[in-house]
Image (cartoon, rainbow, N blue to C red):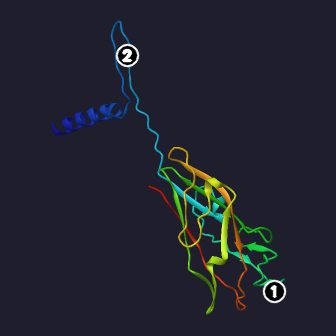
């Protein structure tokens, strides 16, 4: 008796399972029309991407490489402090060895206005010696993706609807208006993108 009940229950579940997973259906006998509905969904994840330098070329993926931009006065040391530009700027990771100190940048966000903020120390340091960060400036090749000024400056990239997708080249300059002691002076600027 129990075996027969178990067999009937198993058979009923096996027959019902396809019906549970099926789309809607309607059977009409005689005249008329049959209708069936299907719900469609498109799922778009909330995404925020900021790439500066090498990471800007990565298609919306994390890249841990941090580029280093160097203004080198080794070949023209008498120009230090004279306001003259370094003869070449080098950028590690991107392979640029000379020319303008331009870094490619990309920002993508899909949930409203993106804000980019720059934070950095007040000075570049070489041991106890310093160069003020105010000796450095940055400009953008694209007004829709302006470069934020150092030390807390912000930028609001242009968006379309609620989506931001902008690229630019940010060009850095060293004023060279002071005459610091010899050394390699270092400092890091951190760009942070936020979105609602």
- Residue at the farthest top position: 31
- Residue at the farthest left position: 1
- Nearest to the observer: residue 134 or residue 46: 134
Dot 1, crowdedness within 10 Å: few (<14), some or many (≥20)?
few
Residue holding disc 2: 34
* Residue 41 appears left or right of 160: left
Q: Quarter-wise, where is residue 188 in the image?
A: bottom right
- Nearest to the observer: residue 7 or residue 70: 70
> Residue 77, which numbered label?
1
Residue 25 in the image, given as x and y percentages of width and height? 36, 23
Residue 40 in the image, given as x and y percentages of width and height? 43, 34
* Residue 38 appears left or right of 181: left
* Residue 97 appears left or right of 161: right
Residue 116 in the image, given as x and y percentages of width and height? 54, 62
Residue 67 vs 122, above or below: the answer is above
Question: Could you tell which of marks 2 and 1 lies nearer the N-terminus?
Answer: 2
Q: Visible in this render: residue 108?
A: yes
Q: Nearer the viewer, mark 2 or mark 1?
A: 1
Dot 2, crowdedness within 10 Å: few (<14), some or many (≥20)?
few
Q: Secondary structure at mark 1?
A: helix
At horizontal 73% and vertical 80% (from top left) the residue drawn is 176
């Amino acid at each position: 008796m129990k075996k027969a009940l178990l067999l009937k229950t198993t058979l009923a579940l096996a027959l019902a399972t396809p019906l549970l997973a099926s789309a809607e259906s309607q059977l009409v006998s005689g005249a008329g029309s049959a209708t069936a509905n299907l719900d469609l969904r498109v799922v778009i994840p909330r995404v925020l991407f900021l790439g500066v330098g090498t990471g800007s070329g990565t298609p919306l993926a994390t890249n841990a490489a941090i580029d280093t931009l160097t203004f080198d006065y080794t070949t023209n040391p008498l120009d230090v402090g004279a306001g003259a530009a370094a003869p070449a700027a080098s950028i590690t990771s991107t392979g640029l060895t000379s020319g303008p100190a331009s870094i490619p940048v990309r920002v993508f966000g899909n949930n409203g206005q993106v804000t980019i903020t720059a934070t950095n120390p007040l000075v570049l340091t070489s041991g106890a010696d310093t160069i003020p960060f105010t000796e450095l400036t940055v400009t953008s090749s694209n007004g829709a993706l302006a470069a934020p000024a150092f030390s807390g400056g912000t930028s609001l990239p242009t968006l379309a609807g609620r989506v931001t997708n902008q690229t630019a080249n940010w060009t850095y300059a060293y004023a060279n208006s002071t005459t610091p002691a010899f050394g390699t002076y270092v400092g890091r600027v951190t760009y942070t993108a936020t979105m609602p």
